[in-house]
Image (tube, rainbow, N blue to C red):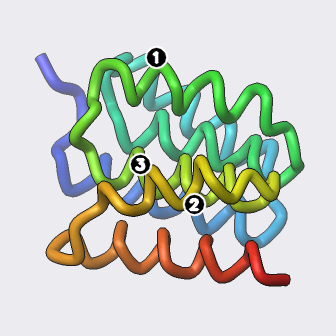
């Protein structure tokens, strides 16, 4: 039985991402972890949890989460995009470019994140 409706879960995940962007890392991480306690298979919450580590430069932990997701969700454009973001911040340009090339432009938000992440390589 699902405790929360999909729309509410989505809103909470978005809230977690916003929290990370506003510097509320601890609170956002607890939110993502709480969602994962309710449903350990929530890909969006796992991506958010990885993001909460990326924003504090804990790339090892973020990449561990994202690599596990890539094994089980190899076609998920959002997972790939977050991994490209992580790789780009680490200046791992070849890996980032290769993975970004597998994200189709029809997956607009993921594709845009990949392009923005690749632009970070030039800084």
Please tell me in which quadrant of the rendered image residue 3 appears.
top left
Residue at the location (61% across, 73% down)? Answer: 118
- Are there few (<14), some (14-19), or many (20+) residues within 10 Å of tag 2? many
Residue at the location (26% across, 44% down)? Answer: 76
Say which label, 1 or 2, has the lower sequence index: 2
**Which numbered circle lies on residue 37?**
1
The picture places residue 35, in percent across and down from the top left corner, at 44, 31
**Which numbered circle lies on residue 112?**
none
Q: Name the residue under label 3.
A: 80
Which marked residue is nearer to the observer: mark 2 or mark 3? 3
The picture places residue 99, in percent across and down from the top left corner, at 44, 51
Say which label, 2 or 3, has the lower sequence index: 2
* Disc 3 from disc 1: Cα separation: 23 Å
**Which numbered circle lies on residue 17?**
2
Q: Is residue 5 left or right of residue 58?
A: left
Residue at the location (80% across, 58% down)? Answer: 91
Could you tell me if the residues under marks 3 and 1 are in contact, i.e. CB atoms within 8 Å? no
């Amino acid at each position: 039985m699902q405790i929360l409706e999909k729309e509410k879960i989505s809103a909470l995940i978005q809230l977690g991402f916003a929290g990370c962007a506003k510097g509320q890392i601890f609170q956002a991480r607890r939110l993502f972890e709480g969602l994962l306690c309710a449903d350990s298979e929530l890909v969006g919450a796992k991506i958010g949890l990885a993001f909460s580590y990326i924003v504090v430069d804990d790339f090892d932990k973020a990449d561990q989460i994202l690599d596990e997701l890539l094994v089980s969700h190899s076609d998920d454009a959002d997972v790939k995009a977050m991994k490209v973001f992580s790789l780009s911040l680490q200046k791992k340009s070849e890996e980032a470019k290769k993975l970004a090339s597998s994200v189709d432009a029809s997956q607009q938000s993921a594709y845009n994140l990949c392009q923005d992440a690749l632009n970070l390589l030039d800084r």
